[in-house]
Image (cartoon, rainbow, N blue to C red):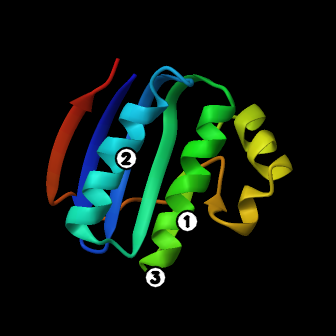
Amino acid sequence: MAIRLEISPGCVTAFLEGEIDHHNAAALRVCIDEAVEQYRPETLRMDFGGVSFMDSSGVGLVMGRAGIMRVLGGRVEAVNLTPQAFKVMQLANLDRLAVIRQKARQRAPQRKEGQHESE
């Protein structure tokens, strides 16, 4: 599992790649939470376009980040979901906590970028 962060005014975008399961979700949480703490964005966008497999840990990842962003007065967007992941997130009622979309809207120009690898 790899994660690439893109920082733009008011937004942190986490581009997720590979598999999201209970073995690597903790490392993803740490990386994303550190970026949210540092940049205090209005929007945390989690881009699932590069995710090849996701178990319930992916739902938990979005749910936990939604709670953090709510406390900070921001919001979470989960975008580029596969049809199956989109349906799972809808069934989990994540659309009440976050914006969930199968496609991403066009991103703002890039300002800073960092990449992290997790196991």
Amino acid type of the residue tagged 3 in the rendering: Gly
Label 2: state its secondary structure: strand
Q: Relative to residue 66, is residue 7 drawn left or right? A: left
Question: Which badge, 2 or 1, is on the more N-terminal residue?
Answer: 2
Q: Residue furthest bottom?
A: 73
Label 3: state its secondary structure: loop
Q: Which residue is mark 3?
A: 73
**x%, y% of residue 107?**
38, 59
Disc 2 packing (10 Å; few <14; some 14–19; many ≥20): many
Residue 67's label in the rendered image is 1
Q: Residue at x 30, y 43 (%)?
A: 31
Q: Report if the CB atoms under discs 1 and 3 are less than 8 Å apart.
A: no
Question: Which badge, 2 or 3, is on the more N-terminal residue?
Answer: 2
Considering depth in this image, is 4 or 40 the residue closer to the camera?
40
Q: Which residue is mark 2?
A: 14
What distance separates the C-alpha of mark 1 from that of mark 3? 10 Å
What distance separates the C-alpha of mark 2 from that of mark 3? 19 Å
Considering depth in this image, is 43 or 56 the residue closer to the camera?
56
Q: Residue at x 55, y 54 (%)?
A: 64
Q: Is residue 6 above or below residue 22?
A: below
Q: Residue at x 51, y 35 (%)?
A: 49
Amino acid type of the residue tagged 1 in the rendering: Gly
Disc 3 packing (10 Å; few <14; some 14–19; many ≥20): few
**x%, y% of residue 66?**
55, 63
**x%, y% of residue 51?**
52, 27
